[in-house]
Amino acid sequence: MMIRSVKKLPSTALIGLAATACVLAGCQSAGHIAPIAPITEQAVTPTINAATFQTTDELFAKPYIDVQEWRDGPVRHFYIHGGFEGTDTRFSYYFPPVDQYEGRFFQHVTPVPDSETLAQKLPAGKYNKIGFSVASGAYFVETNGGGVIDLTKGSQALSDPMITAYRANAAAAQLSRHLAQQFYDVDERPFGYIYGGSGGAFRTIGGLESTTGVWDGGVPYVNGSTMAIPNMFTVRMQALRVLRDKFPQIVDALEPGGSGDPYAGLTEYEASVLREADKMGFPMKSWFGYRTMGLHGFAALYGGVSMADPTYFTDFWTKPGYLGHDQPDLFDDDRIQHESQIVDLITAAEAARLGLDANPFSEANRGGVDTAFILPPGVDGSRIVGLRLAKAPPDKYFLGGELVPESGNSKGQRLFLSRIIGDVVMFGVVNPEQVAQLRVGDAVKVDNSNFLAMESYHRHQVPGPDFPVWDHYRDAKGQPLYPQRPFLVGPLFVQSTAGSQLTGEYDGKAILVASLWDREAMPWQADWYRKRAEAAASDVRLYYTDHAAHGDEPPSGDQNRLVSYQGELQQALRVLAAWVEDGTLPPENTSYRIEEGQVIVPENAAERHGLQPIVSLTVNGSERADVKIGEPVRLEGRIAAPAGGGTISFAGWDFEGNGSYTPVDSLDAGNKILSVSTTYIFDQPGTYFVGLQGTSQPVEAQGSPYAELTNLDRVRVVVSE
């Protein structure tokens, strides 16, 4: 492995890594260190040892294997687990039988260091990474990213962020080749492809840009930019608070058959807040998820921002040019500065018994949804996750805040709070050692002032002209309208996470997969990186998925509105392999334009290109119909696959708008364009959003659950008595 030279990180760059860490104690132990053995289905006696593996990265020079065995789930494969002596890095390899191997591997990278056995927990089917890899002629690689970061004990990753950025993943990739050549008894070097989403996209890009000869290409998906953190979160946090009572009308205006004007009925200030999010690139139709989107990744990022720029929070309330100083009345109804005393320490086990949610990333802590907390296996039930106070904080809007001890051993610290439930406050991402210092009787203050200040942090982080979504924060001469902080925080986080500044300079090829309804990684950021790659003369493609959000898990909450981009991701990996190995050009980029932060795509499949089919639907010839109970409505739809999208394999109706799709009566296989129609009668009054979903698949994928390219369209039917 050859590692590109990397500039020495400033000490503040470590803040980003620490902030994004899962604050969990302990790492998986190495266990018995066994020599590397040759692997066959007949379990032949070992003839090779670790000394034959060669690397220029001396930290990873001594690999070991502690598990090697044939497994049948989800598909037949040979499983290898191990690590590297003297490190926290662990890996898992999944080798298909010889007759299914085509000389390549896929390696998935998680957003933050995580378990090296995650793929084993996925059910069989379209989301299973092992099954997909084997079906694609590849073995699958996953690692723990260098080891879970423990802020209480320290780790190698804290002293060298490049370990989790790319070094651990690169070492595991290189070792996998060494073992694959033995396993398959071949001399040919396996092709390798890395992919990851969100923070994993940062690490995918960083791996490509920081190494040579490790990966032949990569698929970063739902990627951010160097200015993503924390700005993509802060702008929406402001809107979530200010517009919380207006979102029903905003969402309705943007729905099919709505007015189309989300600003109607808003005050001047409310409209300015919505417009600010709009121009920063928040996909407007994705506001339907306002009840549950909450802090999301900001829960893990806040600590790093506050460490990097601690004076901001005082400046916000005391200096001209900051909203807290200039218009403090805008926060009067929501600011909490509540003093009380601790009367009880709530452990994880007690939280589970009381039905309190102790997970800062859960649905309950994204918008006040009542969800019982179930203590996960292996979690220390004695860990303190919340407090009961002598006096309950005021019943105000609360998306996040801090507990500030005013007496006792923890005096002066600030501990992140994720939720208030009556007289109980629940911790977010915190250092357990700090929490352990709290005692019953300590005087404390619940304060959300810093979180309110963060809502407009992006105004004081105006970057250069290559970020046009910040143009509305510049004057006619291009100068910032608001006071600026001493430095830009985002690039520090990205450097510590990715190991690079996302320059677009890499060997090999890359395909970006992005979502048009992504509310965590605003869609314009994929275009931003594509332009960087093209400017560096790097090979790159970009495919957008309409009606898809950020997560790569099955869509949750509203499948009447959302589709999964899993099929686009899988097909991108396959066309990337063909591009690298055979020189087969991938389908054309998705066509789009960007207007004031919003990514806009053509309505015609022949013009949009990319991978995803386009679905269109009308009801009685329009996007809205107002009818009486028992009055039939005529639904007419069209599904069209682009040149690179295969042929149509599924079409289904969601008549009641509940996300359950009934297949159309007949579907002729092999078509790239399909017209469907039906009539339907509603027997109950109400407003229904009828959906039509269409799926296309490349011919070679049909009959499998993989590379299903899905889209949908919806219409509004208002039924009265």
Image (cartoon, grey):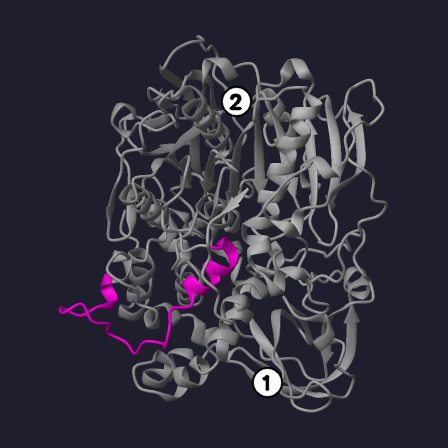
Question: Does 24 appear above or below 553?
Answer: below
Q: Secondary structure at mark 2?
A: strand
Q: Is 144 left, or right, of 556 in this rendering?
A: right
Quadrant of the rendered image containing residue 363: bottom right
Q: Earlier in the sequence, mark 1 or mark 2?
A: 1
Are discs 1 and 2 less than 8 Å apart at CB?
Answer: no
In the drawing, does residue 532 fall left or right of residue 310?
left
* Quadrant assignment for the C terminus: top left
The residues tagged by marks 1 and 2 sit, at their Cα atoms, a distance apart of 53 Å
Query: Residue 14 placed where, x, y %?
Result: 54, 67
Between 69 and 311, the residue placed more toward the observer is 69
At label 2, the amino acid type is: Thr
Per the image, label 1 sits on a secondary structure element best described as strand
Please state the horizontal and vertical placement of residue 465, each as a whole percent of the image.
23, 60
Q: Quadrant of residue 717?
A: top left
Q: Which residues are magenta?
A: 471-499
Q: In the figure, 603 relative to 117: above or below? A: above
Q: Nearer the viewer, residue 603 or 369?
A: 603
In what quadrant of the picture does the N terminus appear? top right
* Residue picked out by circle 2: 662
**Vertical placement of 316 versus 593: above or below?**
below
Position of residue 429 relative to residue 654, above or below, is below
Give me the disc on residue 515: none
Mark 1 — residue? 338
Q: Residue at x 59, y 65 (%)?
A: 18
